[in-house]
């Protein structure tokens, strides 16, 4: 996902933002970029991924779909304050476990994790990826 373009699309349009946990997935950096490095992704079968769920209009989701051609939108079940909710997320289409993670992507994920107050243990794990 192109976080800068997504940020411009959603600027001023987010109705709410909540810390969420996506169980049974793991964060990876295996979406092949045009530079041959791995961009962020999630895949089934992990200890879970922390993140933020944004409430936005369907029209804005459709715009995100268009600026993210290397990703597809899927429905997942997340936990927010211990309660289960349905949410949309994006997963990579062209992935490879043979690409090195893009360090600038990892740094942006860490910055976002700190900004939104994700668990410190999770942030330390993210930092270990650098």
Image: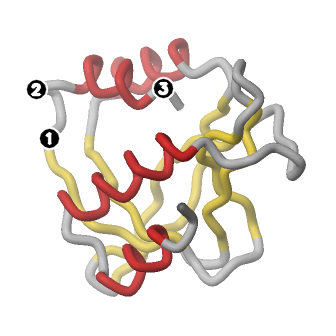
Quadrant of the rendered structure where residue 11 is? top left
Task: Estimate the x, y position of residue 73 in percent, counting from the top left.
Answer: 60, 36
Q: From the viewer's side, name the closer residue of 105 and 3.
A: 105
| Numbered disc 3: secondary structure | loop
Residue drawn at x 38%, y 86% as measured from the top left = 121
Eyeballing the image, is 17 above or below 50? above
Q: Which is nearer the N-term, disc 3 or disc 2?
A: 3
Asked whether the beta carbons under mark 3 and mark 2 sit within 8 Å of each other, the answer is no
Residue drawn at x 66%, y 77% as measured from the top left = 24
Cα–Cα gap, marks 3 and 2: 18 Å
Q: Residues within 10 Å of mark 1 (few under 14, many from 20)?
A: few
Task: Estimate the x, y position of residue 69 in percent, counting from the top left.
Answer: 65, 18
Task: Estimate the x, y position of residue 98 in percent, counting from the top left.
Answer: 89, 48
In the figure, is residue 125 to the left or right of 59? right
Residue drawn at x 57%, y 22% as measured from the top left = 68
Q: Which residue is mark 3?
A: 2
Cα–Cα gap, marks 1 and 3: 21 Å
Q: Which disc is residue 15 wearing?
A: 1
In the figure, is residue 128 to the left or right of 38? left
Q: From the viewer's side, name the closer residue of 106 and 89.
A: 106
Q: Which residue is mark 2?
A: 12
| Numbered disc 2: secondary structure | loop
Q: Which disc is residue 24 wearing?
A: none
| Numbered disc 1: secondary structure | loop
Task: Estimate the x, y position of residue 103 in percent, counting from the top left.
Answer: 54, 46
Cα–Cα gap, marks 1 and 2: 8 Å
User: Which of the two discs, 1 and 2, sits closer to the camera?
Assistant: 2
Q: Residues within 10 Å of mark 3 (few under 14, many from 20)?
A: some
User: Which of the two discs, 1 and 3, sits closer to the camera?
Assistant: 3
Eyeballing the image, is 50 above or below 41? below
């Amino acid at each position: 996902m192109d976080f800068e373009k997504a940020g411009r699309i959603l600027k001023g349009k987010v109705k709410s933002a909540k810390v969420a946990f996506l169980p049974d997935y793991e964060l990876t950096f295996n979406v092949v970029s045009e530079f041959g490095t791995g961009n962020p992704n999630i895949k089934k079968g992990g200890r879970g991924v922390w993140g933020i769920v944004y409430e936005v209009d369907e029209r804005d989701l459709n715009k995100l779909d268009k600026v993210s051609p290397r990703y597809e939108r899927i429905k997942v079940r997340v936990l927010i304050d211990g309660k289960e909710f349905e949410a949309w997320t994006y997963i990579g289409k062209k992935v490879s476990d043979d690409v090195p993670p893009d360090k600038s992507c990892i740094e942006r994920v860490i910055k976002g994790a700190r900004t939104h107050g994700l668990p410190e243990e999770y942030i330390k794990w993210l930092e270990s990826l650098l």
